[in-house]
Amino acid sequence: AITWGSAYPVTKLAIAGYSTNAIGFLRCFTSMLALMAIVLLKGMGGPKKEDIPAFIAGGAFGFALYLIPFNLGLTRLTASTSSVIVATSPIFAAIFALLLFKEKIRPQAWLAMLLSFGGIVVLTCWNGVFSVNTGIFYTLIAAMNLALYSVIQRWFGKGYHPLSSVAYCYVVASVLMSFALPEAWRSLAAAPFSATAACLCLGLVSGGLGYYLW
């Protein structure tokens, strides 16, 4: 939780030298290198052919399509506000599980959902009027995509180590985010050291170490 929570303020530091898409690519690519190194060293093997579509979906929604709106949201929101909104992801996961797997949701869970969405309304009206902050909507999209990733994990085939499943998803995310590679490379020379260090921290700590400990 500490490693994942650090992503909010650290991304703010990275934004000082890199575009949001460049940050997303560097975070995915660095996490992929770290996790795949462990997978290869431990001889966990590769994904089965029939499971590749599930890993593609997981890499897309869980990382690439999560990080793009997540980083955009942080350009318009404080780190603490962003963390509160992303914390609604389990609520969306419950809704998706209801729609896709017909799981039952207890009354207490519905109450929790209402309270969570009520918190978003409070953030939206923080200044006493309804304020349409695009950062809130970007971050909500990120929370929904993260929730979809939680549901998609059910389609991963059996027999995989949890770490290898995440690593394969990061490989997909790195490929999907590779359109930002030229921009990231150009920014590398001009970006302050603190921003570059922040990008490495996102990949190695918030991504690699976070999932390793999980």
Image (cartoon, helix red, strand yellow):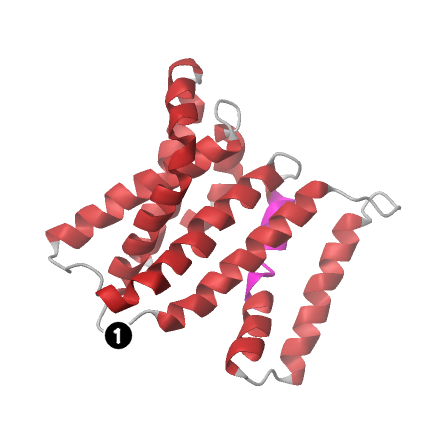
- The span shown in magenta is 80-90
Name the one closer to the observer, 56 or 96: 56
Q: Is residue 101 left or right of residue 132?
A: left
Is disc 1 placed on a helix, strand or loop? loop
**Residue 23's spot in the image, x, y percent?**
45, 34
Q: Quadrant of the N terminus?
A: bottom left
Q: Is residue 119 left or right of residue 102?
A: right
> Toward which corner of the image does residue 34 lie, by quadrant?
top left
- Residue at the spot 58% in from the left edge and 77% down from the top edge: 99
10 Å crowding of disc 1: few (<14), some (14-19), many (20+): few
Q: Is residue 166 left or right of residue 78?
A: left
Which residue position is annotated with label 1?
A: 158
**Furthest residue toward right:** 129
**Residue 2's spot in the image, x, y percent?**
44, 50
- Residue at the spot 40% in from the left edge and 44% down from the top edge: 176
Q: Quadrant of the C terminus?
A: bottom left
> Toward which corner of the image does residue 45 lie, by quadrant?
bottom left
* 134 up-or-down from 40: above or below: above
* 86 up-or-down from 72: above or below: below
- Residue at the spot 45% in from the left edge and 62% down from the top edge: 149
- Residue at the spot 74% in from the left edge and 42% down from the top edge: 133
Name the one closer to the observer, 112 or 95: 95
Magenta stretch encompasses residue 82: yes
Three-letter code, disc 1: Lys
**Residue 151's spot in the image, x, y percent?**
46, 69
